[in-house]
Amino acid sequence: MNHDEKPAFSYPVKVGHISANAVTVHIEANGAERKALGDLWDVLEVQSLTADLQISRWKKDGVKVKGRVQARIVQACVVTLEPVEAEIDEPVEAIFVPEGSRLARIAANDSGEMILDPEGPDVPETFTGDTIDVGVTVSEHAALAIDPYPRKEGASFEERIESTQKDDVRPNPFAVLKDWKKD
């Protein structure tokens, strides 16, 4: 994402104001932000998005964000296209380090490959200047939890395929020829 675009959900935090004692922050998307998130995530509606985060210093110059994001969204059912409500409740964990920080490179080994502990936090994200945007982090964590194939209770693809009596007419053996083109 280029930095000129305003993110759909933004909550900038001044890094200088963060101390070793975690600050607890509650953030909530307003109407305009929910609409922007709905467009971004390609869902019918984002009814709510809130997060409770603890933000603290990490190592010398980094910032650690840990908490939960909760959202209610409405998607179109992949089978019936009817609206399906979904709830998201995901842990959020991210570490931010200043761009160019030694800590940003600590996760890369000699061959330049990233080594990730599947259980641990991801590679630190870098920030420029003195501000991190926890709104973006929260919306990314929520986005990953969205079901790409939402279904209404009980909706299944089979319903579409079940044939009715009139479809059960024996196929005409010459029907295949009608699509056959002479060269």
Image: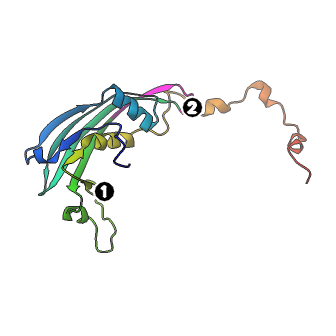
Q: Which residue is mark 2?
A: 79
Callout 2: 10 Å neighbours few (<14), some, many (20+)? some
Q: Residue drawn at (19%, 42%), measured in percent from left and top? A: 13
Label 2 is placed on what type of residue?
A: Val
Instruction: Identify the secondary structure beneath mark 2.
Output: loop
Task: Tell me: 33 left or right of 157.
Answer: left
| Left or right: residue 24 compared with residue 171 | left
Q: Which residues are magenta?
A: 78-88
Nearer the observer, 79 or 61: 61
The answer to whether residue 72 is visible is: no
| Quarter the C terminus occupies | bottom right
The correct choice, above or below, for 110 with respect to 48 in the image is below
Q: Is residue 113 above or below residue 158?
A: below
Q: Nearer the viewer, residue 112 or 119?
A: 112
**Residue 96 is covered by the magenta coloring:** no
Mark toward the start of the polypeptide (2 vs 1): 2
Amino acid type indicated by mark 1: Pro
Question: Alpha carbon of mark 2 to alpha carbon of mark 1: how far?
Answer: 34 Å
Indicate the position of residue 151 as horizontal and vertical percent values. 50, 32
Name the residue tied to disc 1: 118
Tag 1's secondary structure?
A: loop
The answer to whether residue 20 is left or right of residue 108 is: left
Checking the image for residue 17, the label placed there is none
Magenta residue check for 82? yes
Residue 73 vertical position relative to residue 103 in the rendered view, above or below: above
| Residue at x 21% of width, y 56% of height | 97
The reply to whether callout 2 and callout 1 are in contact (CB within 8 Å) is no
Query: Does residue 58 show up?
Result: yes
Residue 114 % position (x, y): 32, 65
- Image location of residue 88, percent across then percent down: 35, 34
